[in-house]
Image (cartoon, rainbow, N blue to C red):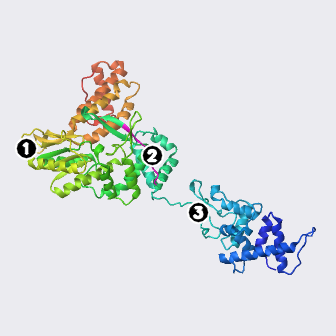
């Protein structure tokens, strides 16, 4: 006698006794046994004929499925196999299963698997489903194996075919899984590294008022949201917060754009994708916002070239960050990347509106906000084609230094400088820019060997003023005049005002250690940059800090209000702790004014 494992499974799980009775009838017919009759005299022969017709339909279905010739397949297996195929079940009304039976309920649960948000059959049903899968020539599963539906992150469920084959129904069903592939391939690691860079740079909140600390409270979800939207192409940049800062010398205001923290992360991800490719393209005399290059490197090169060439053309591009054309920036980006998502988001950031403090929005048709994370690389890339590459083609022998939009060109004569000024002005007009006639000028590098006269003998480049200065010849032991850089008067005045805003003399609740901890990082940064050349020009600024410290001591200790006692206290402190303040490495003196 043949063993029917499927019949055993049905006996364990079935809730409709008519199925069991029909199975008994078929088995009895096979083995020549008599058919049982009910006590009420019910005609079992008629029902058995109907059941035989239904089985014949199942055999036809199984032959179409390609599994009717397998010797392990019984009639009940074929019948159940046909019922589990949703397309066949819809085409064969006679094979429909009611939800009241075990088979119908399991079929119903499988059909709505995607809508159950990852839920699967459990308990006895899961064990029975594994048995059916094994009999249907699939992989049998134990109760500890993975469920029929595979759960995807964020609650999505993927329906898996019972027989390892896709559903060939030809219909677009709501429960079918959507493709997990994103339109753009963006690494999550890239978004994480971008956030680390944003966090290191710090920065103010954007229009949403969310600071970096608040962003980190839900860091995982925030970064996933950025990655998910950028990968799907649905990321829309929010408005940029407009912040007005005064220009040096009181020459008006400069508008800075402050993006949100999330937008800075997205912009940094794009900048990090562009930088490796364009870094190899940039001109060696370009120093702005490049890895391994600092403004002080441009100052050093400019200092050496000023000694070799007598004339300098100091260029100033008028409102560069507000007037750079968008279409040329996009063309430059398209020429240097094969990532369509980079081009897409650059276009969106260029047209992102500015939100002013009163809440009004200003649409921008030109320019890129100064202060965003992606603006430096876009500005460098645009000026590479607009100026650097053009100079290398048209004037190969001419040397220059460029730090973003701050440019210095070295010339051998005034005539050459005038010719270059006219040619560069025309070139910038071709790319949608203009020279500032009030700030663009020709400078004569005057020193002891070059004694000619000219109306301009100084210029400012990246915070340093180049002009004739007194120098000392160590070999000959004499003084002479050299064309040297030092901190500019504008920066010196700006930093002096910042020292005054500290109001050190009013912080009498703090100790000297507290004051040193507060100002040392700032003063050390000034010394590291402007102390490379013309260090003595910073002494008045540093002495002013010492003067405020003396005023602090007089306010804190009454016994030090006399000048002699105050001076003795100062000498004692500077001798006992000569490295307490960073600027004491250069000078301990103070200005005897401002008492």
- Few, some or many residues within 10 Å of mark 2 (<14, 14–19, 20+): many
Q: Which mark is residue 427?
A: none
Residue 324 at what x, y percent from top left?
29, 47
The answer to which of marks 1 and 2 sits earlier in the sequence is 2
Secondary element at image label 2? helix
* Crowd class of label 3 (few under 14; some 14 to 19; many from 20; radius 10 Å): few
Q: Residue at x 77, y 60 (%)?
A: 100
As measured in the structure, the alpha-carbon distance from the residue carrying label 1 to the one carrying label 2 is: 55 Å
The answer to if 235 sits in the magenta stretch is yes
Closest to the observer, 199 or 97: 97
Q: Quadrant of residue 164?
A: bottom right
From mark 3 to mark 2, how far is it between C-alphas?
37 Å
Kindly indicate whether the residue at mark 3 contacts the one at mark 1 (C-beta within 8 angstroms).
no
Q: Which residues are magenta?
A: 233-242
Q: Does residue 233 appear in this view? A: yes
Q: CA distance from mark 1 to mark 3?
A: 84 Å
Locate residue 360, reporting x and y percent. 40, 36
**Label 3 or label 2, whichever comes before in sequence order:** 3
Q: Nearer the viewer, residue 78 or 578?
A: 78
- The residue at which mark 3 appears reads as 172
Q: Quadrant of the C terminus?
A: top left
Q: Is residue 57 left or right of residue 174?
A: right
Residue at which label 1 appears:
450
Is residue 259 highlighted in magenta?
no
| Residue shown at 65% from the left, 68% from the top | 87
């Amino acid at each position: 006698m043949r063993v029917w494992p499927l019949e055993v499974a049905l006996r364990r799980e079935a809730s409709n006794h008519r199925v069991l009775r029909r199975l008994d009838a078929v088995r009895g017919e096979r083995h020549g046994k008599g058919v049982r009759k009910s006590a009420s005299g019910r005609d079992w022969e008629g029902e058995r004929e109907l059941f035989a017709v239904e089985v014949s339909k199942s055999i036809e279905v199984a032959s179409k499925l390609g599994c009717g010739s397998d010797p392990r397949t019984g009639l009940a297996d074929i019948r159940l196999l046909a019922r589990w195929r949703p397309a066949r079940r819809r085409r064969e009304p006679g094979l429909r299963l009611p939800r009241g039976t075990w088979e119908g309920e399991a079929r119903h649960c499988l059909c709505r698997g995607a809508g159950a948000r990852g839920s699967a059959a459990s308990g006895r049903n899961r064990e029975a489903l594994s048995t059916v899968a094994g009999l249907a020539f699939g992989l049998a599963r134990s109760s500890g194996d993975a469920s029929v539906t595979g759960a995807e992150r964020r609650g999505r469920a993927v329906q898996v075919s019972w027989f390892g084959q896709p559903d060939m129904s030809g219909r677009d069903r709501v429960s079918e899984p959507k493709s997990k592939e994103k339109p753009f391939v963006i690494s999550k690691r890239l978004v994480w590294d971008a956030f680390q860079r944003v966090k290191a740079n710090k920065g103010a909140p954007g229009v949403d008022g969310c600071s970096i600390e608040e962003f980190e409270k839900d860091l995982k979800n925030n970064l996933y949201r950025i990655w998910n939207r950028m990968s799907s192409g649905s990321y829309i940049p929010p408005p940029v917060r407009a912040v007005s800062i005064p220009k040096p010398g009181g020459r008006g205001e400069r508008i800075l754009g402050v993006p949100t923290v999330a937008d800075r992360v997205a912009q940094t991800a794009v900048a990090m994708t562009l930088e490796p490719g364009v870094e190899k393209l940039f001109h060696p005399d370009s120093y702005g916002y490049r890895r391994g290059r600092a403004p002080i490197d441009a100052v050093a090169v400019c200092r050496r070239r000023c000694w070799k060439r007598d004339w300098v053309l100091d260029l100033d591009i008028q409102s560069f960050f507000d007037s750079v054309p968008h279409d040329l920036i996009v063309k430059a980006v398209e020429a240097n990347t094969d990532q369509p998502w980079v081009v897409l988001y650059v276009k969106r950031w260029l047209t992102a509106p500015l939100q002013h403090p009163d809440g009004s929005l200003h649409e921008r048709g030109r320019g890129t906000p100064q202060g965003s994370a992606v603006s430096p690389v876009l500005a460098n890339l645009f000026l590479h084609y607009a100026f650097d590459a053009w100079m290398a083609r048209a004037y190969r022998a001419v040397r220059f230094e460029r730090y973003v939009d701050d440019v210095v060109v070295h010339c051998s004569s005034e005539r050459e400088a005038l010719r270059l000024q006219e040619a560069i002005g025309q070139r910038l007009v071709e790319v949608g820019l203009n020279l500032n006639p009030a700030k663009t000028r020709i400078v004569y590098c005057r020193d002891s060997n070059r004694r000619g006269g000219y109306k301009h003998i100084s210029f400012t480049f990246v915070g340093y003023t180049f002009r004739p200065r007194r120098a000392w010849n160590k070999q000959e032991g004499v003084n002479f005049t050299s064309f040297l850089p030092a901190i500019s008067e504008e920066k010196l005045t700006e930093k002096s005002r910042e020292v005054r805003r500290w109001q050190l003399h009013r912080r009498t609740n703090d100790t000297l250690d507290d004051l040193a901890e507060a100002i040392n990082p700032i003063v050390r940064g000034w010394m590291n940059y402007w102390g490379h050349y013309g260090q003595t020009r910073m002494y008045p600024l540093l002495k002013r800090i010492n003067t405020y410290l003396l005023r602090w001591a007089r306010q804190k200790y009454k016994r030090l209000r006399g000048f002699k006692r105050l001076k003795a206290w100062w000498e004692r402190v500077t001798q006992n702790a000569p490295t307490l303040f960073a600027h004491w490495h250069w000078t301990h003196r103070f200005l005897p004014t401002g008492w």
